[in-house]
Amino acid sequence: MIHVTATESDAVRAIEAEAVSSRFARGWHCLGLAETFKDGKPHTVQAFGQKLVVFTGADGKTNVLDGYCRHMGGDLSQGTVKGNEIACPFHDWRWGGDGRCKQIPYSRRVPLRARTSAWPTMEQDKLLFVWNDPEGKQPPEDVRIPVIAGATRDDWTDWRWTEQIVHTNAREVIDNVVDMAHFFYIHQSFPTYFKNIFEGQTATQIMKGVTREDSRRRREGSGGGGPRMLGNTSVASYHGPSFMIDELTYHYEGYDLTSVLINCHYPIDENSFSLHSGIIVQHSDKLPPEAAEATAQKLSEFILVGFQQDVEIWKNKTRIDNPLLCEEDGPVYQLRRWYEQFYVDAAEVKPEMTDRFEFEIDTTRPVESWKKEVEANLARLDAEGASA
Amino acid sequence: MTSRQDERLLDGPLVPVACRRCAAQVLVRKSTWEQTSIQWNAAARAACVGIEDPHDTCPALRSAIQEAALTGSVKVVDG
């Protein structure tokens, strides 16, 4: 039994929120599909509070530099790719992917200090990643994004990729890792099992769910063709501060649909981020290539609906550093403790930020309550159907 | 950003549980019979031989926690 004293229970709970830091997370951030940046043109990317230029040289390597030319401040992302260099539109200064000025066509020599900031890049699974580190260090060898086998295999679809700008701090999207209940109230899912594990640079959410009959009826009416989806199993891990790989299996009557969902972002500034989703679907007997493509398209649209539901909440909610939790909520504080490792210098990362932590929710009460709610919704839909 | 404490721990703190299969000692909290929080440290993690899939809880540790809950050394908050 928990006894709450009168003073504790009578005091108004204050919402606390410190000013948002303008420091950006250390780690690999995905900028999207690699081929987007391979069209021989420079691309403007607003990220980490500044303007970047992303360009692919004749050698095929994609580079990320500070967007502004160190000469007179020209916007390199408005320039031209010449060979392996980006040429400034203002005076044609040529910058290499290593951040060094390689050539000034109208000058006999390049000044000694002609160096700009360059971000390490990596291409993997047809995606472009950029390494951000406020300390300016190179990415350690052991800090990696796992390879996604299906992304380069013939028996999987190609990426369906989406991007959008969200106007809030990126912590909001991270918080979803531990937020079981919002999947019912915001996303019309029905979680029945929920567990988190944080360890090292990885934060995992394991969730199983069943299909909500009331949502299905609202979507499809009482008819509803096609195979019945029974539920899903999702194992979703953030690898570092911004890149989540979700091994997502949809269970249909008689077969499973295997997919990998990417949910990733990079900060534009402290009050906005670019939110990306990607999905690939595995072919199977039940899902030949064309059907898998169509399914991937449908799932991609479904994910966007989900993002929209989150965005509606984020647009109107307030930042809160001291969420008031019930026992059926997930480990928000422990997740934020994990997330903090990316916002301190590498030498300041404390064991408690990376030590393994496991949290399994007791879903008994949520499931009871949600069953009742679904039944009530179905009764209402029946009544509406009868009167129509 | 300063780390804050999960206030739920005020209603029932994490308490130590030792595994009997290895030398791992972890901190545990149970809000109900079905809910479990497990806080590891580096020494315990290095000692554990039961985590084959990092997404699973060590089965030996799970048994030790169940027993601790039954004997009352881990108090179930809403038990």
Image (tube, coloured by chain):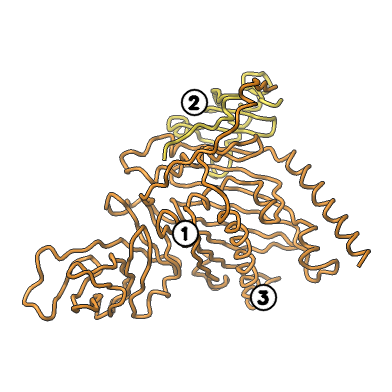
User: Which residue is tagged 3?
Assistant: A291
Of residues A29 and A319, the one drawn nearer to the viewer in this rendering: A319
Amino acid type assigned to the residue bearing label 3 in the image? Ala
Disc 1 marks a residue whose amino acid type is: His
For chain B, the rendered hue is yellow
Q: Is residue A135 above or below residue B40?
A: below
* Chain letter for the part of the structure drawn in orange: A
Q: In the rendering, at what x and y percent does residue B73 appear?
A: 62, 19
Front label number (1 vs 2) = 1
Q: Is residue B38 above or below residue A153?
A: above
Residue on which the image places disc 2: B23
> What residue is drawn where x is 73% and y is 63%?
A255
x, y percent for residue A386: 93, 64
| Badge 3 and badge 1 in a common chain | yes
Query: In whole angstroms, how far apart are the C-alphas of marks 1 and 2?
Result: 40 Å
Quadrant of the rendered image containing residue A59 = bottom left
Q: Is residue A23 left or right of residue A158?
A: left
Classify mark 1: helix, strand or loop. Answer: strand
Residue that numbered label 1 is attached to: A265
Q: Quadrant of residue A12?
A: top right
Nearest the viewer among A200 and A55 is A55
Q: Chain of mark 2?
A: B
Q: Secondary structure at mark 2?
A: loop
Of B46 and A357, the residue lying toward us: A357
